[in-house]
Image (tube, rainbow, N blue to C red):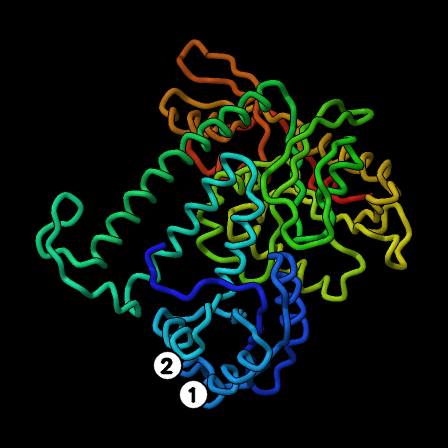
Amino acid sequence: MFFERPPSGQQALLLHVRAPGVNCDKEVAELRELVVSADLEPRAIVVVTRTRPHARWFVGQGKAEEIRLAMNSNNDDLLIVNHDLTPAQQRNLEDLLHARVMTRTELILHIFADRARTHEGKLQVELAQFQHGRSRLVRGWTHLDRQKGGLYMRGVGESQLELDQRMIDNRIRKLKERLERVQRQRARSRRRRSRAKIPTIVLVGYTNAGKSSLLNALTDASIEVQDRLFATLDPTMRQLSLDGYGTVVIADTVGFIRDLPVDLVEAFKATLEEVSAADLLVHVVDSAAPEQDSMCAEVDRVLAEIGAGMVPKIEVFNKIDRSTLVAGVSGNRVNVSARLEMGLEALKEVIAQRLGVINEPINVCITPSNGKVRAWLYELGAVVGETLQEDGGSNLSVRLDAEQINRLVAHEGVSLQAALPDPTLLALP
């Protein structure tokens, strides 16, 4: 973009640094999957043990020289590091290797840029790229130190660094403005669905858990399904009819992964808002994955980070055709095979039951002085009906989760006119 860097290659040497005594098999395996998903060729993997990164070379000068010799011997033209580097470390390695050095964050951004298909998705990826790129301008790129006075483009004495920062800042501002319009449109769509009493179910989970396959199986959709990380990037929504309940909207979302780059989380705010605003989450788990416990923990961490930790959730263990699980309800989860369409009816029944409890409207009385509370309820898209009182107050029929109810009743001048649902009914059968 603004950097004088070696061209990117295809044949990659992979580098992972671990602390002494720490097993890193799962991290290394996931890195290899990411590289393959990026349509790059992983040639070899180097694992280095260090107590702390080397300030100049990240791995130490001797090890960096070994990597240079190995890459030259194998004709590798790309080093992929399973960590983030400082700009100086990245520049020093590229100067030594005469090859592009790609960090884990850059690898994931590369995959996202390749997979984005919709206008919104491309905007979000571009924003993440520019936000990440700006953080690399602070230091480490020597060609940015030259002071030049320029006509039109550059102010008198403005450095190349300052010019690049200004250009990136302007582009980031414009991208954010365009994405804010997308967010407002999504909010309007959520309010329309709420007024129509159509709940939204969002599929979440670790990347490649089978969310798109499950959406296809439930709704007869035709979303492209591939057995690789981040095969689905752009959100997809479909209608689903549930016996005994009615029509719902079910949405597929981008998968999560360990150490998801902060710039991506921020840039995909419009998409991730669909998760935090959902009526119900379906957490899809790959039942055949050996690291499913740590994957589930990472999904829960990301959900909490984006404000969706309190949204009601069902756990669905997918790919039972590759494991020993039996289709149907098992304790607090539902076991299915989206590929073989096993356990889907049981899942639909559980979803309908959960929605029947969660969407029981609550009647709320708000005094005239609580206009901000009323506005907050409308902003949430929680209001399904309203009657004005003679004194200017409001009787509202709303759908809220437990956390939102607690926030609501904390305000003076707000009273509930109906009993709350029994929390024990929220458990799976």
Residue density around tag 2, few if under 14, some if 14–19, many if 20 or more, within 10 Å: some
Residue nearer the viewer, 302 or 58: 58
- Location of residue 424 (image quadrant): top right
Residue nearer the viewer, 33 or 40: 40
Residue 56, label in figure: 2
Q: Secondary structure at mark 2?
A: loop
Q: Is residue 420 left or right of residue 424?
A: left
Residue density around tag 1, few if under 14, some if 14–19, many if 20 or more, within 10 Å: some
- Distance (Cα) linking label 2 and label 1: 8 Å
Give above or below for 267 relative to 103: above
Residue nearer the viewer, 287 or 359: 287
Q: Is residue 69 left or right of residue 170?
A: right
For marks 2 and 1, the one nearer the N-term is: 2
Give above or below for 141 relative to 242: below
Question: Identity of the amino acid at label 1?
Answer: Gln
Location of residue 248 in the rendering, given as x and y in whole percent from the top left corner: 70, 27
Location of residue 51 in the rendering, given as x and y in whole percent from the top left corner: 49, 86
Residue 38, label in figure: none
Q: Secondary structure at mark 1?
A: helix
**Quadrant containing the C terminus in the rendered view:** top right
Whether the residues at callouts 2 and 1 have beta carbons within 8 Å, the answer is yes
Give above or below for 84 relative to 310: below
Location of residue 256 in the rendering, given as x and y in whole percent from the top left corner: 60, 53
The residue singled out by tag 1 in the image is: 61
Kindly identify the residue that appears in the image at 41 percent across and 30 percent down.
181
Kindly identify the residue that appears in the image at 42 percent across and 51 percent down.
129
